Amino acid sequence: MYINGTRNIMKGLLRSNTGSVLPIVLIFIALIALNTISLSTVLQRDVRLIRRIKDVEQARHIAEAGINHALADIKANGFTARSNFTGSMDTGSYSVTYTQSGGRHLVTSVGTVSGVSDTVSAEIKDNTPTALNFFSASGNDIRINSLVAGARIVGDIHANNNVYLKSGPLIAYLYITGRVSATDTVKEGTRYDQGSWDIWDNHVVINGDSNDTATVYEDEDRVTFPTFDFTKYQQLAEDSGDYYDTDQEFDGVSLSPGNGVVFVDGNVDFRGNCTLNGGLVADRIRIIGTLTVNKSGTRNVLMARNGNVGIFGRLYTEEALVYASQDIISLELLADIDINGIMMARRDIVMWNFITLIDYTYAYVSPSDMLGEDGEAVFEVVSFNQ
């Protein structure tokens, strides 16, 4: 009897609790679901946060790439040629802008990845020698005489003393497209400001005008000249086997220096038909035959470090800096000269052309291992802000 009574009591209890079990189970399931949703939300938020941190980091690196692109562009094309630009990479893009305020030059790059942006800026000091902005620049005088010849110069000309231009009187012409300036005076023809009475001035044409009607610039600031790391040039030539320790006469040769430059610790004469693929540094250079200078690498120079560059034959440059620590002298008869790049002399530039075709065209050249006038870097990053 007792056993049967206990069984009946248990059945009653089960029957009486059946209605409360289901709500408890449902509440428990709801709590689990809510926990899962909350955990999922937290995880998604963390994923988004991690992704944003990653995007910001990538955006900063891309912005830095934009700064590096800007610095390389200034190095290749000159400080004055800088302009705003955009670029892209596999993971994003950058936008670079230049500003100037109170003598400070600032380059700012905004990198963007998946809609997330970061900004990097750098202040730059410009030490670029101003002579690089001219096709022809001299520390003293520039004298150009075109006699029974056709001469065309595309680019600016400046002398830290005087500029003398003369052409004619027969079929010769001297055409200049560019700015002609001097720290002292610019004289066209044999006399100063004589107009059409001066037959040597009639065929000097500056930007379409002749007979002293062309606009020229006098009393201008002196230009500054670069210096060069000649020790670096010599070491590079030694490393590649292109170093010569005495005077050289190259006759009908083709030179292709392994490190981009031939270094001669002495004087050089070019005879016959010669080709230079790269640059050459010597004490003094004379071109008696034909020399063709092709652009190769980043050291395209024809450089007389202790004397003159004398052009008495034919010279063709694809893109080069022709530099003399003293004078550049061009005396041609029945010749053909085609120079693309820059002609620069610490003293005088003297060009007398008789029955000679002349074609000079400015192209900005910034060879490696070139320094500012006082030996400083061409441009310096003063500050870098992330």
Image (cartoon, grey):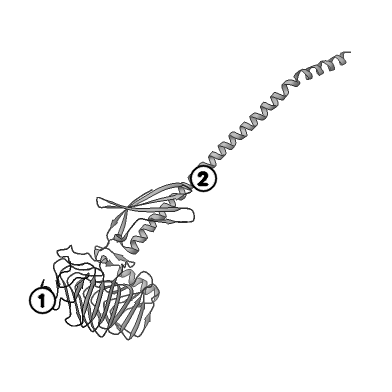
Residue beneath the point at 59% across and 37% down: 40
Image coordinates for residue 357, horizontal then vertical, percent: 26, 81
The relative height of residue 338 versus residue 25 in the rendered view (above or below) is: below
Q: Amino acid at mark 1?
A: Trp
The residue wearing badge 2 is 51
Q: How many marks?
A: 2
Considering depth in this image, is 47 or 265 the residue closer to the camera? 47
Q: Is residue 319 among the parts visible in the rendering? A: yes
User: Horizontally, is 240 left or right of 41 in the view?
Assistant: left
Residue situated furthest top in the rendering? 1
**Would you identify the image quadrant in which residue 187 lies?**
bottom left
Quadrant of the image for the N terminus?
top right
Q: Residues within 10 Å of mark 1 (few under 14, many from 20)?
A: few
Q: Amino acid at mark 2?
A: Arg
Q: Residues within 10 Å of mark 2 (few under 14, many from 20)?
A: few
- Tag 2 secondary structure: helix
Image coordinates for residue 297, horizontal then vertical, percent: 38, 70
Give the mark toward the camera: 1 or 2: 1
Residue beneath the point at 32% across and 81% down: 291
Label 1 or label 2, whichever comes before in sequence order = 2
The residue wearing badge 1 is 197
Image coordinates for residue 132, horizontal then vertical, percent: 27, 66
**Would you identify the image quadrant in which residue 185 lies?**
bottom left
